[in-house]
Each structure stands twice: as C-alpha cells, then as structure tokens.
Amino acid sequence: MDQFFLSAIDILSSNPLNHEFGRTALLMGSLIAAVCGFLSSYLTLKGWALMGDAVSHSVMPGVVVAYALNLPISLGAFIFGVGSVALIGFVKQKSRVKEDTVIGLVFTGFFALGIVLVSKVRSSIDLHSILFGSAIGISPTDVSQTVFIALLVILLLAAFRKDLMLYCFDPRHAKTIGINVIFLHYLLLTCTSLAAVVGLQSVGIILVVAMLITPGATAYLLTDKFDNMILISVCSAIVSSIIGIYVSFWFDLVPGGSIVLAQTFIFLFAFLFAPRYGIFKFQKLFAGYKQ
Amino acid sequence: MEKQNYNNYRIIAENICVDYNGKVALYDANLRLEPGQICGLVGMNGAGKTTFFNALTGFVNISKGKIRINGESLRSAQRDQTIAYVPQSEGIDCNYPVNVWEVVMMGRYGSMNIFRCPRESDVQAVKDAIKRVDLLDYLSTPIGNLSGGQRKRTFLARAIAQRASILLLDEPFSGVDIRTEKLISELFIQFKNEGKTILLSTHDMIHVKEFCDLVLLINKTVVAYGETSEVFTPENITTTFGGISPDFLFGPES
C-alpha cells in the first residue's frame, strides 16, 4: 500500500511545468484549444460538424505539399481545405449522389492523396506526428507559425463575431440587409482550415475534428446565451487540453488521444448534469432557481 | 417618362424566372406594388411562394427578368435596408442561443459600423420596436423559451427596428395565438398608414379577404393578379390549387 502511494506521488510530482518542452506544450496546447474552441461554437450552431470533419481531413495533402516545397503550411492547408468544399459543392450539384455521401467521398479521397504524398516525400515529414499530433514536441519554427495563425483566426472571428452569429442564425436576413454572406461563408471555411492546421499540431489530423466540434457541443448544452457559449467553449477546450497534457505526462500516453478524451469526458458530464439540457436536469434540484 | 413611372412603385418585378440547377421554380412572374398596399401571395406548397420571397430579397439569383425596388436595383435596396423579411416559424432554429433583444438588434446591423456596435439610436429603435409588439417583459428571454406567437412578434419587431419600407412576411398567421393575431392585424393597419408596402404569403383565405388590397395567385407562375375582390374568384382559386374547389378551402358557405 505504501508502495502504491509512493509511486502515485512520484507520478504526480513530475510536473510538465518543470520542463521547457512541457511549458511550451501547455502554452501552445492552450492557444490551439482557444482557437478551435472559439470556432467550434460557430460550427456547432451552423450544423457544420461533418463539414469540419471534411475540411480538417482534406488539408492533409496541402500540409504535405507545403512542407515539401517549403511554403507556409497554412497556405497549402487553405487551398486544399477550401478546394475540398468547392469540390463537394460541385459534385453535389452535378450528380444525384446525396450530400453526406459526397462529403465522405471527397474528404477520404483527399486524405488518401495526402497519405500517398507523405510516403513519397517521407524523409522530411513525420507521418506519425501529422496523424496523431505532437503536443509535447512542437518545434520552435512551428511555434511561431502556430502563434501567428492562431492569433489571425482569433482576430478574424472576434472582428466578425456578430456577423457570423447572424449568418449562422438567419443568412436570409443577413443578405436582405446587405451583409456579404458569401464573404462570411468563405471566412468561416478559411478559419476552419486554418484551425485544422493548428489543431493537428496538438491532436493530429485524425482527431482534430473533435477539437472543432466537442467544445461547442458542450457549451451548447450549458447555456442559452451566445457570448457565454463562446466563453464556455473556449474554457472547456483549454481545460481539456491542459488535463490531457498533464495526464499524458504522468502516464506516458499519446497527448492527442488524452486531450480529446478529456474533451469527451467534459461533454459527457454536461450531457448528464447540464442544468437545463442535461439528462438529470439539475435545475429542478435547486428550488427557486430562476430561469 | 418611363423612369419616373418606375419610381412610383415600391416593388416592380418583371418576368422574373428562378431555377435551381435547371429545375424551374418560378417563371414569368410579375408584380407591381405601391406604397401603402398590402398584397397576399397565395399558392400551394411548392408553388414558388418562398422562391418569390427569395428572389425579392436577393437570396437567390433570378435567371431572367428584372427587379426594381423604389426604382433602384436590388443591391442598393439591400444597402439601404429597404426590405425586411419576416421568416416563417419553421424557417429558423429555435434552439439558437440568442434572446429577444439580440434578435431585434439584428435588424439594426445593416446601419451599424463593421463591428456592429450599437449606438444610442439603435438601442432606442430596438426598445421602441419591442414595445410595439408588446414583448418588453421578455427582453432577455432566449427565443427557444418563447411561444410561437411571441417568436413571430420578435421577428416582426426586428423588421420594425430595421425601419424598412417593404415588409415580406412568410406565413405571418401560421401557428400564432389569438392575441398575436390581433396584434399583427393592428400592426398591419399602422404599417399601411405609415406607407409601408407589405407582401405576405398565407394559406388562410380568410386573412386574404380581411387584409389584402391585392392578391397574387401563383402556381409556378402568376395565375392571376389584381384587386382582391376581382381576382379572388372560385375559378382562379381552383386553377391555383390544381383543381381543388374553393368549397374545400373555405367551407361550403363561401
């Protein structure tokens, strides 16, 4: 028994904050989580979860090509992210195949292309870190690029916060009063591809979609106010990122997996215990709780 | 001369056609409305009522024809927030996390700066609009917690706050309580006196007879258009509804 406690203390005292790379991982993880959490509110409300999945997987060949040609990965990701959505729209319009089928078809095609390309230019790229993330081992060049993209996306989303809220709610009204909805549509898509690029650093391309939908879904269960939803979404994303990194540190796990698992557990908690929309409707337990 | 004539009309739609991926939704539709007129848009489901609204708001592009709003292009009407659209209840996501105040404030977005920061005048306009639809007690209620009628009034308030001179209302009377119905009909009279032009779609024939100066019967194209008393004949209605007799729609006494 003593032995057990001693080893437990041993594990818990190994704090990532004591290491340079641990501090970087926590900071970058939080920043990435904040970006994805912010965006995920919009994707959840717009009903673009599947679209987020498609875009985040489709950026893969863009990332690989950009690496190989020494271009900014954000550029490659942007071209393939938006390209995949354009292709989805085109195939849907020109054929009788249903939309969800088209989405699945296009993004797996792009993803496969990415994997084929990686195997051709393997020397410079680590497939494993693209697929599963490398929250603990982000290189200094990646750091500056990630910080730049993350701040850009946060700035864009913050500046067009209300327009995007209106666009997701009632695009027809937006159009009627002269707001450029096509611009907002592509703004949201661009932000999704950029968020996918920064997100894949942390959890990898396979799981990045979780970063783009789970925090928003959690927040959606917890509030009826738009601003609160963004706040909760960002906070829950940051908290799960920190928990995920700590847990992976203690038990030597893949950080990507543990970050997403932490998000899933927070969602599960909200699903069960959210005051108004949880299964147990906690609200009823508080007598006199005002709506 | 022609130009001057155009300016007398709030809405002019000439031979407009809309198709979605080659499927024709509306063809050769015409409409002319003056200030202070209320026009009912009547037709079956899928007859092109919503498409007509979409064309007039610029939400879909017309493939042929011409639309003039106050004698100017649709684009400048959008810029001036001339047209307000009040959606039908099914057309909006009731679970969206916004409250009454935020929805009505959306009516002012077009005249705000790019960050949509409300000025004193915007706040006042929103307050006045909410007062007119009698929802002052519900300012911070999420729209998901409102009744169907209250939600309808919220969107009407948004159109009022927008200070639009043209109102497009999609099924304004569907799924509302008596109180809201009474309030909406009172508002219609006020709008008419203020010189606003109203185009409303409805399934309910009684409301057409009660409110509308003009009727536009459509079934993919205009079946008949004109003064309610002249156009609203059993023959026209039968054509519009693909052979169903008006007895079935109104009850035998009409």
Image (cartoon, rainbow, N blue to C red):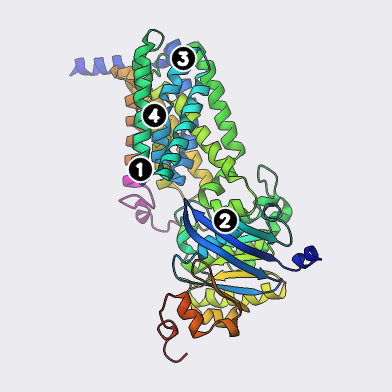
Residue A241, given in percent of the width and then of the height, sits at 41, 27
**Nearer the camera: disc 2 or disc 4:** 4
Q: Quadrant of residue A250?
A: top left
Please check the rendered image and state whether residue A277 is part of the magenta-colored stretch, yes or no. yes
Q: Is label 3 in contact with label 4 (beta carbons under 8 Å)?
A: no
Q: On the same chain: label 2 and label 4? A: no
Quadrant containing the N terminus of chain A in the rendered view: top left
Q: Determine the residue positioned at 58% across, 28% down.
A: A152
Secondary structure beneath disc 3?
helix
Q: Nearer the viewer, mark 1 or mark 2?
A: 1
**Badge 4 density bin: few <14, some 14–19, many ≥20, Cα 10 Å:** many
Callout 3 touching callout 2 (CB < 8 Å): no
Label 3: chain letter: A
Q: Earlier in the sequence, mark 1 or mark 4?
A: 4
Q: In the rendered structure, the residue with mark 1 lies on which chain?
A: A
| Mark 2 crowd level (few <14, some 14–19, many ≥20, 10 Å Cα) | many
How busy is the neighbourhood of tag 3: few (under 14 within 10 Å), some, or many (20 plus)?
Answer: some
Q: Is residue A18 above or below residue B102?
A: above
The magenta stretch is A271-289
Please state which amino acid type lies under the numbered disc 2: Val
Q: Element under label 1?
A: helix
Q: Which residue is mark 3?
A: A67
The residue positioned farthest toward the bottom in the image shown: B253
Mark 1 belongs to which amino acid? Asp
The chain identifier of the residue carrying mark 2 reads B
Q: Which mark is residue A100?
A: 1
**Which residue is under mark 4?**
A57
Task: Tell me what residue is drawn at x 37 percent, y 51 percent.
Answer: A277
Earlier in the chain: of badge 1 and badge 3, it is 3
Q: Amino acid at mark 4?
A: His
Cα–Cα gap, marks 3 and 2 = 45 Å
| Residue at image mark 2 | B103
